[in-house]
Image (spheres, rainbow, N blue to C red):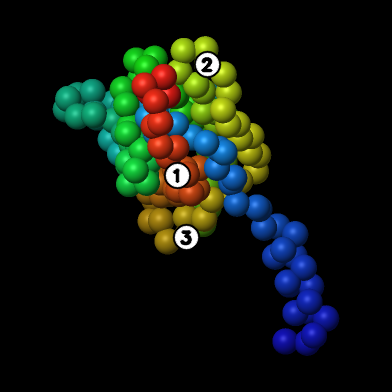
Amino acid sequence: MPRPLALLVVVAAVACARPPIAPPPHPPARIAIVAPDNRTGDQLVVSGRWDVAMLLGRPVVTAPDVLARDLAAVLAARGFAVAPDDGDAAELRVTLRRFVPDTPRGEFVDVDLDATLQAPGDGAVLWRLHRDRWIVPTRGAPTVADALGLAARAVAEALVGDWTPTALSSPAAR
């Protein structure tokens, strides 16, 4: 590859790269996952069609369902206690504003989202993320539903995969 072209490719890659998501400075050890708020206007079905699922009594699984499940799994794997959403733990809230697959190729899902970690009790914001035009790779997904599921899993890992729980030092911290 000619040197100017190689330089252009490197500059383009660096310009398009997003910085990693910074974790909260001191995330509490107990976190509740609030069901993600889907404001996309689409159902984002990963498995089961609404009409067929209703007739057969099978559950419909959506990208927000997968995101919530995987957020809980990643946090638990990182040493957090994943608590019920009853107000006694910090709450992780995610709002999906855009979750659009690259159809028909399935190479990526274009994601816009907001996420907050709120303290128990007063709801003070401990961490906040606003992300637009997040291109989440889903190369190899055979269907749109598979791409949505892959993207939800990747978003969960990217959001909380680098978090480390703050040790509980006193009963008041619990």
User: Where is mark 2, residue-wise?
Assistant: 123
Q: Seen in the image, is 150 located left or right of residue 119?
A: left
Please state which of the two labelled residues, at mark 2 or mark 1, is closer to the viewer. Answer: 1
Residue 58, located in which quarter of the rendered image?
top left
Residue 101 place in picture, x, y as percent: 51, 45
Query: How many marks do you count on the picture?
Result: 3
Three-letter code, disc 2? Gly
Depth check, front residue: 155 or 44: 155
User: Where is mark 3, residue-wise?
Assistant: 139
- Which structural element holds mark 3? loop
- Which residue appears farthest toward the top when viewing the image? 122
Q: Quadrant of the C terminus?
A: top left
Name the residue: 40% across, 31% down: 169
Name the residue: 49% across, 35% down: 27
- Which one is earlier in the sequence, the residue at label 2 or at label 1? 2
Cα distance between the residues tagged 3 and 2: 38 Å
- Which structural element holds mark 1? loop
Q: Quadrant of the N terminus?
A: bottom right
Residue 157 place in picture, x, y as percent: 44, 48
Three-letter code, disc 3? Arg
Depth check, front residue: 73 or 90: 90
Please state which of the two labelled residues, at mark 3 or mark 2, is closer to the viewer. Answer: 2
- Which residue appears farthest toward the left when viewing the image? 56
Residue 126 place in picture, x, y as percent: 56, 28
Asked whether the beta carbons under mark 1 and mark 3 sit within 8 Å of each other, the answer is: no
Mark 2, other Cα within 10 Å: few <14 / some 14–19 / many ≥20:
few
Q: Seen in the image, is 36 located left or right of residue 131?
A: left
